[in-house]
Image (spheres, rainbow, N blue to C red):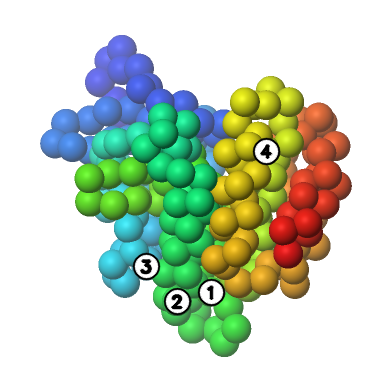
Amino acid sequence: MKLPAGAEPFANGRDADVYALSDGRVLRRYRNGHPVRDEAEYMRHVAKYDYPVPTVFEVDGPDMVMQRIDGPTLGDAAIAGQLTATELGELHADLHRRLHAIPPPSGADGLVVVHGDLHPLNVIATTDGPVVIDWCNAEEGPAEFDVAMSAIIFAQVALDPAFAELTPLLREALGSYLAHSIDPTPGLPAALRARSNNPTLSSEELAMLPAQEALIRSHL
């Protein structure tokens, strides 16, 4: 998909860059050429059930043209004092409840649509409510796995010395999230294994997984 000459991304993730287009649209492009077809199909699937997700307009290899969503992330909103830690946890629990109520594309019993990376920086706080972005890890699986994965990510930031000023906020948000969610215990071992195989994590981040598990279990 061709971009205007000299176009520069206005946002960068670990794997992708986002470019502004006209008419309230953006182009999200994976730097490694990863195809986005499956990701787009999950976004389109949950949108049919009125789940808050950007509208997908076009897909081409590693490129996805979708609706531009304006607003701070829930993480930024919480840091700015626009959300309490309790509200942050409750919002994530509610987003997971709503997602896991959607039948999976295959219709398989016991499985749900798993986002796999639902955390405060992957939810945009818009004037119409929260919108969930970054569906590259979406798949079908058990709801407990999805809840456990989000808990791990909350715990990771809460225990990271680089974000020590956020530790009280994230610890409280994690407790709120788990208090309003289903019990993630059955999905925790698989989520920890998946996290340990995540190639984007540093060796320091991987070394913190046991402490993250301990923090999560202390809230259960």
Quadrant location of the N terminus?
top left
Q: Which mark identifies residue 101?
A: 2
Asked where in the image residue 102 lies, by quadrant, the reply is bottom left
**Residue where numbered disc 4 is placed:** 158
| Cα distance between the residues tagged 3 and 4 | 33 Å
Whether tag 4 and tag 1 are in contact, CB under 8 A, the answer is no
Q: Badge 1 is on which residue?
A: 112
- Mark nearest the camera among 4 and 2 is 4
Instruction: Judge left or right: residue 138 versus residue 158.
Output: left
Sequence-first tag of 4 and 2: 2
N-term-proximal mark, 3 vs 4:
3
Please say if the residues under marks 1 and 2 sit with CB atoms less than 8 Å apart.
yes
Q: Mark 3 vs mark 2: which is more N-terminal?
A: 3
Q: Are marks 4 and 2 in contact (CB under 8 Å)?
A: no
**What amino acid does circle 3 point to?**
His
Residue 174 position (above or below residue 160):
below
